[in-house]
Image: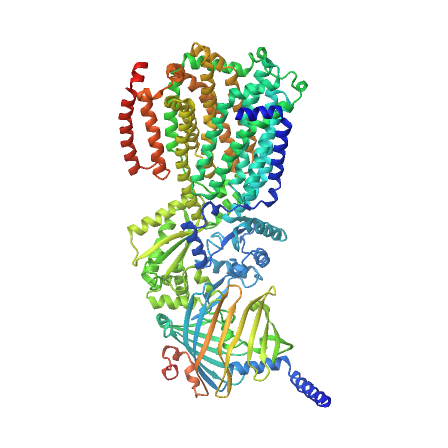
Amino acid sequence: MFRRIIKFSVDRPKVVMGIIAVLVFVSLIQFPKMKVDTDPENMLPGNEEARVFHHRVKEEFGLYDLIVLGVVNEDHPEGVFNPSTLEKVYKITERIKGVEGVISHELISLSTKDDIEQAGPGAVRFKWLMGQPPYDKEEALKIRKRAMENPLFYGTLVSENGKALSVYVPIEKKDMSYRISGEIKQIISEYPGSEDYYITGLPVAEDTFGFEMFKQMAISAPLAMLIIFLLMLAFFKNPRLVMSPLFLAGITVIVTMGTLIGLGFTVHIMSSMIPIFLMPIAVLDSVHILSEFYEKYRQAGDRKKAVLDTIDDLFMPMLFTSLTTTAGFFSLAFAEIPPVQVFGVFVAFGVMLAWLLTMTFIPAAVSLTKASSLKGFGAREEHHEEGAMNAFLKFTERTALRRWKVVLAVTVFLVGFSAFGISKIVINDNPVKWFTPGHEIRVADEVLNEHFGGTYMAYLVLEAADGDGEVFKEPDMLRYIEDLQEYLGEEGAVGKSTSLADVAKKIYYELLGGDRKNSVVPPTKPAVAQSLISFQNSHKPDDLWHFVTPDYSKVNIWIQLTSGDNVDMSRVERQVSDYISDDPPPFDIKKGWAGLTYINVVWQDRMVVGMLRNFMGSFLIVLFMMVFLFRSPVRGLVSMIPLTVTIVFIYSLLGYSGKNYDMPVAVLSALTLGLSIDFAIHFLQRAREIDAGKASWESTAKEMFREPSRAILRNALIISIGFLPLLAAPLVPYKTVGVFMFLIMVASSIGTLFILPALISAMPGVIFDERKNPSCRCSYCVIFGIIVASGVAYVLGGYSIASWKTTTVISIGVIGAMAGMCNIVSKRKICVSGE
Amino acid sequence: MRKITAITITLALFVSGAAYALTADEIVRKASAASYYQGKDGRADVNMVITDSLGRTRERYMTILRYDHEDNGPQRFYVYFHRPSDVEGMSYLVWKKPGEDDDRWLYLPALDLVRRVAASDKRSSFVGSHFAYEEISGRGPEEDTHELEGEEDGKYKIRSTPREPGEVEFSYFVTWVNKDNFVPVRAELYDKRGKLYKTIEALEIKDIEGYPTVVKMKASDLNTGGNTVSEFSDIDYDIGLEEDIFTERYLRRPPRRYIR
């Protein structure tokens, strides 16, 4: 069937090209329908419990996503508390109120906050913190003094050293943050002076990242293509032929993205990475074909015959490399993260599409290439014998054949070394760190978190277990919250926290005449209630409802973290749980977390655990395929060895280098698996084909270390170098992709070229044993049984073999039973007689 | 027939012409007197229901006593809280002094504390409701400049602009005042950027002891979507309150006779 399609492509190239052109056109007209979604919150399904809770908390406590504008004045002796700076802040605040998408009445700034203060003997007064810009120095300093004395403001609105103040801009929707921060920058630029302005906050980081990501798609991807083109040109020296893999990659990306958009999926941060993943995979197969064609063309002389021969040779390995890669990505469809599912399914689709195009487009392109333009194309063996590549391959051949024990020893050592490195991996993520150091968002983040109690908001919600009872008017409960806050403050991570207890204390203290000793929670429930109702005589009574619900059954503790690292958020979460279990609260309460900082932790956990599971699953699926492809469980296992070594080695580097296992790394694990196996498949499959006509492994090896190995090396070089330009991208995930691509290619090609031949040298009989009936070998049968049982256990156990479950026990029993059966089966008559 | 019509029109013109003769300032002063100075003194029970944008409600139940020195002149209020139960006994005393800052005292029984609340401005909230302080006690007509913008179905439409714009959060407000009894029935407040952000409406007006009295009113915050509805009951005018009640020492010792 496929042979006919390939033949058709060679014979009627124009028809094939026409069909492909139509496909590309149809895909391209889908692009204007593109809907972009840059919200990482969508990493969780809309009905996810944590997300539903987060939104309910936001609604119940009137909370909004915040853009943080920091104003720093290092030059003035009084910092930002001088009339000129404050006047600018006043005016900028007023202007920001008018920006569309800003919730102006919830804007938090010196000029929008009300304060209670002493107003002469026996009197208190509610007064705007900065009702209007101060006239003189004294007034500016008075504002500073009042802000510093209010626990609701210092560390949040003003820095403790008085050098910085901030404006929190609540916005209607997160995906407006990039635009709104742009408009804020515009406003700021109209008030020049000695002040420095910084804009940060998770919504801005996330939205800006999305924006820059799409921008990078237009720069990094084409640049990678250009480098790949130049490298291929250096190897094959024929621009026309070399163009075809690039076109193929382009067509694959356009059709895949067109289908995704056409089917109505939004282009999320994840799916925007599809092109960068598809390109190397798409190019890989064509490089194999061109490589082989390059070697065969001279001998065959006829380009059509040469291309058909080439595909005949490469059909099985290419099919299987594509299938394994597809399996690796398709397994992402089981991740419980919608954008990852879309990503996995469409990369899988793209890989198969690339394979189909390799079978049709490349032959058609070769067929359309005029014979004259192929002049001088093809291998000139004599010249190559001296090349660096050949020298390397000669070295490899000698080592693998004669010093295979050394190779295997080094391999074992490497696995041990890697296992230790993997144990040091830190799972952590922080969307702000998706920007390279020096990016304005990173800088703003550092500066502001140095000055303030933290720009990362998390909300700890405590709720009366029985749902009512005005528990949070109880002084005991408020004192408990006060102690909890104090504990969190001492433990690190939390820079500042604010709660109903702080509000009650502040009012009580001012009502009693501003005596420090009265800075305590009011002593009785009515005293709490009356202090809080007094607070409601301010200009902004509703500010109270950011801390407590009107029925006093739930409180919200604002927790500011100076770091958006998920490890820090997780640490705080643990501290709170420990505190509550060690020292139970005076009333029965439930706790819950909300806030973007927390949401990130939830989807990270989901992602990391999900990825690990999928990885295990795809590993098993690939193993199955290898057993099927090589018609032997042992060969299947052997083929997995270089890949396993590659993967553990690459991930151990994460552990040793201290780079965090984050979202991009998690996604790359699917790619690592899919790409690492490729070289092993090519090597083993070709070795078996060649060995069929040879007397010994030595003579097979001689041939193996020529063209097939050269193709592997060429591929490795093209992809690894081709993706190095990604290292110049200002976004860390792009750098990560570049580094991983480089490592995967280098490690898996070297691993394949050393470890596989060494293994074959160690047991050539096992690898090339082409006996028809593997069931006669009891050990083969048992290995196969183990693979099947773990596969079934993986599916039944909810796509997880990472944990010990009942299914694990059952499957061990099944393996035992199957081993017994294997024993019986292998002693059948034919087997015994055939022996 | 045509003649009669002509006469009617002439008459109508004359009458409305006479009404127009009232200046905006006069209308506002009459409106202020009609809504805040009925009788010599008065009492009312007030039930306030504060509803937020999520539909969650809070209640305040209080008794308000009032004592006037003269119409649009100095005035005293005594506010006693009955509910919520944990604030029962909390009371306020307000000495309203047109042309200068009011004096305000607060008594918190749980703290056994009387505190003067300096009224640097009167735009702060009245116990967490959507009414500002002066929307309960009355904003002095002399604090704004008034402009008669016209008449709409039997109501004067008056635009008032503050003389001290720095002290208030609105840039101007528009009031509709009934022509027949000078009761203001609707006010719209516009913020500094000219956006309507708050409305106050008289939902029900009753004649009580000869005084047209708003017995139900509603303040709505258009920014947050919340509102407060106040219902007045047991209204009584000219009950002979002694001025003495409206002094600091009565905060701790509420005049039970009038508070019930």
At horizontal 49% and vertical 81% (from top left) the residue drawn is B75
> Residue A130, percent across and down?
53, 62
- The C terminus of chain A appears in which quarter of the rendering? top left
**Camera-side residue: A543 or A253?**
A253
Residue A99 drawn above or below residue A376: below
Residue B241 drawn above or below residue A625: below
> Residue A412, percent across and down?
37, 22
**Camera-side residue: A824 or A787?**
A824
**Camera-side residue: A13 or A395?**
A13
> Residue A26, percent across and down?
61, 39
At horizontal 52% and vertical 58% (from top left) the residue drawn is A107
> Residue A637, percent across and down?
38, 24
Q: Quadrant of residue A814?
A: top left
Left or right: where does residue A794 sit relative to residue B98? left
Q: Quadrant of residue A803?
A: top left
Residue A438 drawn above or below residue B236: above
**Camera-side residue: A673 or A133?**
A673
Work out whether residue A201 can be spotted: no
